[in-house]
Image (cartoon, rainbow, N blue to C red):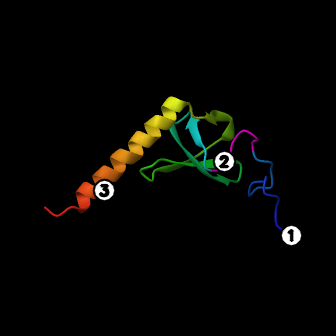
């Protein structure tokens, strides 16, 4: 029998306000990111650059519209830099 979709790997219930794929802000890290998975009692947050970290759900909230725009701008900048690095000299 598989675990219910609303549980994490440790068997506990997921925080109702947090969902995979949503933009969140980690107050301890001082950065927004995308919630990518639940890892036991922690959540995994990923930035558009690929930087990842684990955070305790109690210190994470939904990102504001400004923080979401910040993530979008970071993603665009990261893509531009990747394209520039691949371009022939």
Packing grade of label 3 (10 A; few <14, some 14-19, many >=20) is: few
Closer to viewer: mark 3 or mark 2 = 3
Residue, x 51% and y 38% (percent of image)? Answer: 32
* Residue 59 seen from this side: yes
| CB within 8 Å, label 3 to label 2 | no
Distance from the alpha carbon under mark 3 to that under mark 2:
31 Å
Region in magenta: 15-20
Depicted 11 relative to depicted 17: above or below:
below
Furthest-right residue in view? 1
- Marks 2 and 1, the one that precedes in the sequence: 1
Q: Earlier in the sequence, mark 1 or mark 3?
A: 1
Residue 27 percent location from the top left of the image? 56, 32
Mark 2 residue crowding within 10 angstroms, few (<14) / some (14–19) / many (20+): some
Pinpoint residue 37: horizontal percent, then vertical percent. 63, 54
Q: Secondary structure at mark 3?
A: helix
Name the residue carrying label 2.
42
Using the numbered discs, state the Cα–Cα distance from disc 2 to disc 1 in whole angstroms. 24 Å
Please tell me which residue is depicted at 37% across the width and 46% down the height of the picture: 76
């Amino acid at each position: 029998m598989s675990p219910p979709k609303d549980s994490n790997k440790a068997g506990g219930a997921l925080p109702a306000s947090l969902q995979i794929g949503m933009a969140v802000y980690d107050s301890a890290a001082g950065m927004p990111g995308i919630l990518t998975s639940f890892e036991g009692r922690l959540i995994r947050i990923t930035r558009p650059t690929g930087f990842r970290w684990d955070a305790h759900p109690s210190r994470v909230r939904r990102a504001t519209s400004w923080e979401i725009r910040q993530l979008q701008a970071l993603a665009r900048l990261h893509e531009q830099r990747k394209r520039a690095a691949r371009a022939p000299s």
